[in-house]
Amino acid sequence: MTGGPRPGVLAAAIAVWVLAAYAPVLDGDFVWDDNFLIAGHPAVVELGAPADYFGRVFWSSPEYADDSPAFYRPLTVLSFAIQHHIVGLEPAFFHLGNVLLHAGCAVLVFLLALRAGAAPLAAALAALLFGTLPRLTESVAWISGRTDVLATFAVLGALLLHRSERERTGSRVAAAVAILAGLFAKEVAVAGAAALAVHEAWRARHGLATPRRALLNLAPLVGAGLVYTGMRVWASRASAELVQRVDGLPVAERPAAALQALGSYAAMLLDPLRPRVMNGVLGETHAGLVALGTVALLAALALAWRVARRSDAPHPLAALALAAAALLPVLHLVPLAGDIVAADRYLYLPAAGLALLVAWSAGRLPTGARGPATALALCACLVFSIATARRAAVWADELAFWTHAAREAPPHQAQAHAGLGEALLRRGRFEEALAAFREAEARSRARTRGGLPPEYVAGNMALCLAETGRLDEARALLTGLVRARPQVALNHFNLALIHAMSLDFDAADASLAAALERYPGYPRALGLERSVARAREEWRRLPPAQPDEATALRAARARVYARVGNQREAEALWREVLARPDASAEHLDRAAVFLVVRGDPDTARRALALLREKAGREARVRELEAALAARREAG
C-alpha cells in the first residue's frame, strides 16, 4: 500500500504491542514445572559442558525411577542454564526471555506473510492476532512453555531463510540448521520440515523445479533429521533407566480420542478469550467434541484441497501444512505423557501457521470487504491484548494461578489441585495444602486409569502431616508407599525425612541407604545424611530433657530439631527461649534468625524487638527485618 507505514516500522510496532500485552508477567515468579526445570535443575543452576544437555533426556530424574517422559529438548534447558549463568535465579529475566522470543515470533510471522505476498497492513494484523491470542499465554507466560516458543522461533526463521533457487545452497543449509535447533527445543519443530517439503513439492508439481531439484533442495533437511535422530538415540540410551514407558490409550480408542482432541482445539480457537490449563481428561469421551472434531477434520481437508488447487504460490499450502503437522503429534494417535485431551500450549506453532494463512487470505477478499475486515481484526487485537494481559497477570502469581486452575479443572482432573497444594505448601499453609492434596488424591483415585504418580500426592501429603505435628500418620502413609513402590528413591528419601524429624536416627539411616542404593549420588539424600549424622552427635551429647533445664540446653535442642527439618518442634523451643529472662544475646539472635526464615511472622517480630531491646544489635535487627519483609512479599 503506497504511502503506508514501512515494514520496519510495522515490525517494531508489533514487537512493542506484544511486549506491552505481556508486561504483567514480568513481575511473576516460578510456577508449576519451573520449580523443577529451572530452580531445582542441576544442569540449569550450574552451567555445564554441552554433553550435559545434549546427552540426556529432558525430564530425567532418578528420584522418580521410571516416571520421566522421554522428551528430548536440550536447547531449551541450555537456554535456561545460560540465562541463569548471566543473571542468576531471577524469575523476571526468565519471563523476559520468553516474552522477547514471543515478540520475535510475531515479527517473523509478519515477515513471512510479506514474503507470501500479503499487504503490509494485513501481514501486521495477522501477526498481532497471533502475538496477542490469549490461548497462547500458557506458552509465553509460563517459563517452562519456552519449549514451544523457542521451537517456533527456529521454525519460522527456517521458513524465512529457505530459498529454492539452485544457487542458494547456503540459505537451505542455514534453514536446515534452524530446523535442527528447533528440534532440539521441542519435537514439534518437525512441522517446519513438513512445511518446507510441501513448499518444494508444490514447486515441482507446478513445473517450477524438477522432482530431482526438489529432492536436492530438501537434502540439508534430511541431514538435519539424521543428526537429530542420532543424538536423540544417544541421549535416550544414556538415560534409558530413567525413562518411563508411556502406554497411552488402547489402539481402538485412539481415533475417537484424536477427533475429540481436534474438536477441543477447534473449540479453543472459537473461544480464544478463555484460556485454560486443563482441557478434558484423557479416556473420558465427549460426544460433542468428537462431532466438532469430525467437522473440523472435514473442513481442514476441504480447505487443503481448495488451497492446493487454486493458489498461485506455495506459501498458503505450506502454512496449512505447518499448522496440521504441528497439531498431528498431540492428537493421541501415538501415546503421550500426561492425561489431558488438549493443552493451550500445543496451539502455539499451529496458530503461527494459521496466522500466515489468514494474512494470505486477506488479499483474496473483495475490495468492499477489506475495510470492515481490517476494522474487525484491529478490534480483535485490542480485545485479545486485554484478555492476554489479564491472563498473564494470573500466571504471574503462582497461588492465584493454581486457585484459578483448580476452580476450572474437570471433575476427574487431579493436577490442578496437586499444584495448588504445592503452592500452599511452599508458603507454609500446611492445613490448606493438605486439603488440596486430599482432593487431588480423591480425583486421581476416581479415574479408571491414569492419574498422578502416588509418590507425588502421598509424599506431599506426608510432608503436610509432618509439618502439622502428625508424624505418626506421615510415617504410616510413607511406609505403605515404600512397600507399594520400593523402586522409587524419592519414597525412601521422604520416609527418611520423617524418621529424622522424629529423631529416629537409625531408621533414617536405613531409609537413606535404600534411597542411595536406588539413586547413587542422590544430592538431597546425601545432604540429609550429613544433617542426620550431625544431629545424632549433637543430640547424643545432650542430657535427658527437663522442664526447668537451662536456656542453653533448650536452644541446643531447638538447633537439633531445625537441623533435621522439624520446624514445628524447633519453633516451639525457640519460643521458650524467647520467654526466658536469662536468654543471652546469642540465643536471641539464633531464635530471631530461625523465626524470620521459617517461623510465625508475629513471633519473629517479637524476637527482633527483644534482640533490639536486650542486645542492642541495631544493625543486625535491620538486616533481619529486611529479610522478614522480603519473605512477606514473596509469600
Image (cartoon, rainbow, N blue to C red):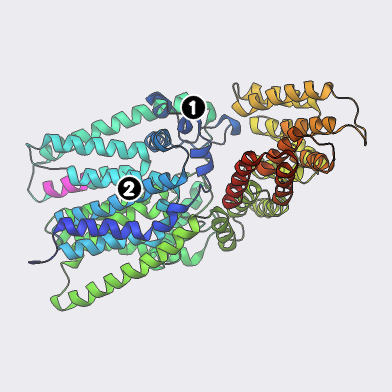
Q: How crowded is mark 1: few (under 14 residues within 10 Å), some or many (20 or more)?
A: many
Residue 547 x %, y %: 93, 36
Query: Is residue 397 rendered to the left or right of residue 148?
Result: right
Determine the image quadrant of residue 388.
Answer: bottom left
Q: Does the magenta stretch include residue 567?
A: no
Residue 574 visible to the viewer: yes
Residue 347 x %, y %: 38, 55
Asked if residue 521 is positioned above or below residue 547 in the image, the reply reads above
- The magenta-colored residue range is 196-204
Residue under the point 27% across and 63% down: 302
How many numbered discs, if any?
Answer: 2
Residue 407 x %, y %: 59, 63
Asked if residue 439 is positioned above or below residue 475 in the image, the reply reads below
User: In the structure shown, which secondary structural element does the residue marked by tag 2 occupy?
Assistant: helix
Which residue occupies the foreground of this view, 243 or 42?
Answer: 42
According to the picture, the residue beneath numbered tag 1 turns out to be 239
Amino acid bearing label 2: Leu
Residue under the point 60% across and 49% down: 629
Residue 304 visible to the viewer: no
According to the picture, the residue beneath numbered tag 2 turns out to be 101
Amino acid bearing label 1: Ser
| Separation (CA) of disc 2 from disc 1 | 30 Å
Query: Is residue 89 rendered to the left or right of residue 448?
Result: left
Which residue occupies the foreground of this view, 561 or 335?
Answer: 561
Residue under the point 84% across and 21% down: 541
Query: Is residue 131 rendered to the left or right of residue 470?
Result: left
Which quadrant of the figure contains the N terminus? bottom left
**Contact (Cβ within 8 Å) of mark 2 with mark 1:** no
- Pointer 2 or 1: first along the chain: 2
Give the prevailing secondary structure in the magenta stretch.
Answer: helix
